[in-house]
Amino acid sequence: MTPSKWRTTLVTVLTAAVFNFGVMSAAQAGIVSTGAIVSAERDADLASIRGQLQRADVQAQMQEMGVDAASVDARLATLSDSELRDMAEQMKNAPAGGDVLVLLGAVFLVLLVLELVGVIDVFKKVPAR
Amino acid sequence: MIAPRQAASVLLAACVLLLGGCATRGPLLEPSSRAVELDATPFFPQARYECGPAALATMLGASRVAVTPEELEKRVYLPGRRGSLQIEMQAAPRAYARLSYRIAPELAAIVAELDAGRPVLVLHNYGLPFWPRWHYAVVVGHDGNKDRLILRSGKTRRQVLSARNFMRAWDNGGRWALVVLQPGELPTAPDNRRYLESAAAFEGVASAQDAWRSFDAAARQWPEDPVAWIGRGTASYRSGALPRAIEDYRVALRLDATQVAARNNLAVALLEAGCVAEARRQIEQIDTTALAERMRTEVLDTRRQIESRPADAGTPAAACGGATQ
């Protein structure tokens, strides 16, 4: 990372941390969310500071992947703690469902390779009349 | 360097392996008397890479949420990946007051959901093992007699796939399938953990009323599960119905006295209801030394709040219901 990128990341992390701590204490007022209970059963000690770091990390990755800043917060708001953790770890490699239109192209490509190396012979010249 | 001939053999072998699923010959769907097709399911033909938003709009439309793929694009499309991630597909319905629930990775589970009138979102992989092509589609029907499934997929309003071809693409996609539920609606044969995780994830976004409905359904389905009651209690707390919240937390503690979160939340609700002495009695029963960091912070915080209040705010002890617990 370049120094300026480091700075941006640091600022994002701190801003997110400060912002989220504020919101959390105001909205929940001492109540432990059911989400925390469910995730605590799987992951005994998910420190909230780690959660904040992951949030900032996902935020940064999303913007890098072309999501506009205004949408990022709305998208993160719907994620549970464990989903946020999965996002932080898998965003670059997890399956991303998108396009099947290239499928035909893929089949053609495979056939073409096989044809060129002589394994199959399906592309025949149209006989001249 | 591999010779072209060898490379071709490898490629061919890969294709053969991929087609290995063909080995079983019998029908995959139960040849049932009843074929089901959810005709009323809307259809949104996908734009270039946007099968995710289109499939999700189809799912939400079937659950009576009118939303366009264009709007959903802002929620689930990742330009950098030219596609949509499963996690976000699963999370997005919560923003429209709907839960998403991962169904069991079996064809029978898809059929059961269709029979119950719910279309099923699936992830297919049409590529090769080393070159995956991921695609979201919505299953809207099954026909056991002809051993085939009907889908809304890509630009095709009514795609008919043999069960065999469907299974190949679904297997390669990790057998991921989910349904969209209204608050209070349960899937067929609900799995306790998976449903409660769905409801808990929904709680963070949902209105207090919607959260209450979701956990109420869970408490009816699994009356012995403390987490269902805690969830319902917290929803009541959020809507200001303190006596109901207190009652639900107490039910959870009767089922499992070691539920620290239930006791902490009970103490908070009691304190807010003016039952300072009873709140103190509850919070003092928690041994904080053995707790995980996050939970200990919450409990100590509640304890401080209680200690900062005058000993008795004047609410009669009987109204605080301390005798039973």
Image (cartoon, coloured by chain):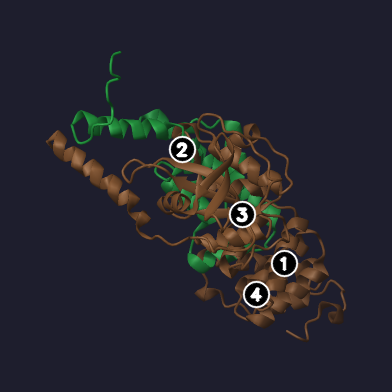
Chain colours: A green, B brown
| Residue B188 in sight in this render | yes
Q: Is residue B298 above or below residue B256?
A: above
Amino acid type, mark 4: Pro
- The answer to which of B158 and B7 lies nearer the viewer is B158
Q: Give the residue drawn at x 72%, y 44%.
A: B65
Q: Quadrant of the N terminus of chain B?
A: top left
Number of numbered markers: 4
* Badge 3 element: strand
Amino acid type, mark 3: Val
The residues bearing labels 3 and 2 have C-alpha atoms spaced at a distance of: 28 Å
Q: Quadrant of the C terminus of chain B?
A: bottom right
The subunit carrying tag 4 is: B
Reading the chain from its start, which is encountered first: label 4 or label 3? 3
The subunit carrying tag 3 is: B
Q: In the picture provided, is A77 more to the left or to the right than B23?
A: right
Q: Which residue is mark 2?
A: A61
Q: Are marks 3 and 2 on the same chain?
A: no
Q: Which residue is mark 1?
A: B217
Q: Are marks 1 and 4 on the same chain?
A: yes
Q: Are marks 2 and 1 on the same chain?
A: no
